[in-house]
Image (spheres, grey):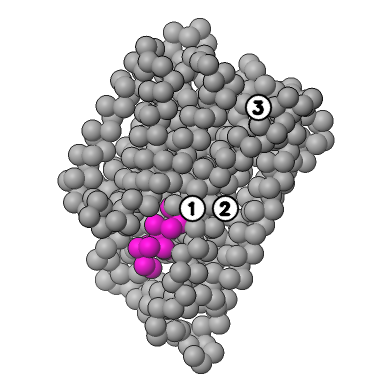
Amino acid sequence: MAEGRAPSRLEGKYIAIIVCWLLGNGCLFSWNSMLTIGDYYAYLFPKYHPARVLTLVYQPFALGTIAILAYHEAKINTRKRNLFGYSLFFISTFLVLVLDLATSGRGGIGTYIGICAISGAFGVADAHVQGGMVGDLSFMSPELVQSFLAGLAASGALTSGLRLITKAIFDNSKDGFRKGAILFFSISTIFELLCLILYALVFPKLPIVKYYRNKAALEGSKTVAADLAAGGVTIETPNDPIPVDRLSIKELLMQNIDYALDIFMIYVLTLSIFPGFLSEDTGSHSLGSWYALVLIAMYNVWDLIGRYVPLLKWVKLESRKGIMVAILLRYLLIPAFYFTAKYGDQGWMIILTSFLGLTNGYLTVCVFTSAPKGYKGPEQNALGNILVFFLLGGIFAGVTLDWLWLIGKGW
């Protein structure tokens, strides 16, 4: 293949799938690490409800940032956007480590404010990376966006697994909570640096990625120019950044309002139960301090499995009405969780939590892979950003509604 030319065949698909999986992991690994060591923060800040407050701080930053980025997506350099996001993840994760070492693991309002500020920075980074990557992958092969979304869920499953291991290792040692947390964020910092290098140096050079970005550029996309240059491809693009026949953000939203509401409703429900309700409101059981960790791990593992189920064509839901009905039926989980927490035993709670994760992952992939079909590259990028905006909006609404479980608990 001549230097400066885009490849004519789709090569390197499986390597691209692995890289997308790792990049999806990096998008939420830091944040999931912070959520997963919630028991350490609950021990450090017993009066401040860290499991709920940290999520509530994170979300407005994520939602505000994605709103601005989604509105201006046609003019934004995707490469700079994603590199900024992964760099911010790396720096913020490193700062969590520095803050804990500098304060020698002491609690207090100052440390808590510092942790909250870092949580806000994670929100800004998430909006840059998740919107940028989903938008970029929306005009590529559906397997790539599916792999990125599976990576998002895998970060939860991996951090949960790591947390169970560190708890088992350090459970009975002096300062065990803290040692586990430090090990956690050391691993996170190294992993975020790996993702930054992967996106900067490996991803733009993959033939399949160059092929789809070149195709999007020929359809009028301006967001891919820097990435194509990084991959060694030079291309003549029209001077006008948005071709006349490209649908506007508003038109795209009107045509896909059902998909936008789908993704919003999936995450409103999930986040009104996970992780706050599971961390604080499930009572005491024979598993003791392991109980919340086991529930969160089960959710994460089944969320990951759910994101691979749509790869089986015969179980993938593609009907717009079918997806909407499935999402509405899922709201029956609210009374199910309420009564299980009140009257059920831990086995039923573990089954319910697994089902919450499975349906969350499955329906997310069904929406994100079905919505972009039939649009041009620049429109698919815009639609990917719109859906991530509604996803983060759903998370924010869910996290806020999560506080309703505390009514009547004396807080």
Disc number lying in front (1 or 2): 1
Secondary structure of residue under mark 2: helix
Most foreground residue, 268 or 282: 282
Residue of label 3 = 41
Residue of label 2 = 26
For label 3, the crowd category at 10 Å Cα-Cα, with few meaning under 14, some 14 to 19 and many 20 or more, is many
Q: Residue at x 44, y 20 (%)?
A: 346
Residues at badges 1 and 2 in contact (C-beta under 8 Å)?
A: yes
Residue type indicated by callout 3: Tyr
Q: How far apart, in angstroms, are the residues tagged by discs 1 and 3?
A: 26 Å
Which segment is the magenta one? Answer: 137-149
Residue type indicated by callout 2: Gly
Image vertical order of residue 88 relative to residue 266, above or below? below
For label 2, the crowd category at 10 Å Cα-Cα, with few meaning under 14, some 14 to 19 and many 20 or more, is many
Most foreground residue, 284 or 66: 284
Residue 138 on image: x %, y % = 37, 62
Q: How far apart, in angstroms, are the residues tagged by discs 1 and 2?
A: 8 Å
Residues at badges 3 and 2 in contact (C-beta under 8 Å)?
A: no
Q: What kind of secondary structure does the magenta stretch mostly adopt? A: helix
Secondary structure of residue under mark 3: helix
Q: Earlier in the sequence, mark 3 or mark 2?
A: 2
Q: Earlier in the sequence, mark 1 or mark 2?
A: 2
Residue of label 1 = 151
Residue type indicated by callout 1: Gly
Q: Residue at x 50, y 69 (%)?
A: 15
Q: Residue at x 27, y 66 (%)?
A: 375
Residue 195 on image: x %, y % = 61, 59
Within the image, what quadrant is residue 408 found in? top left
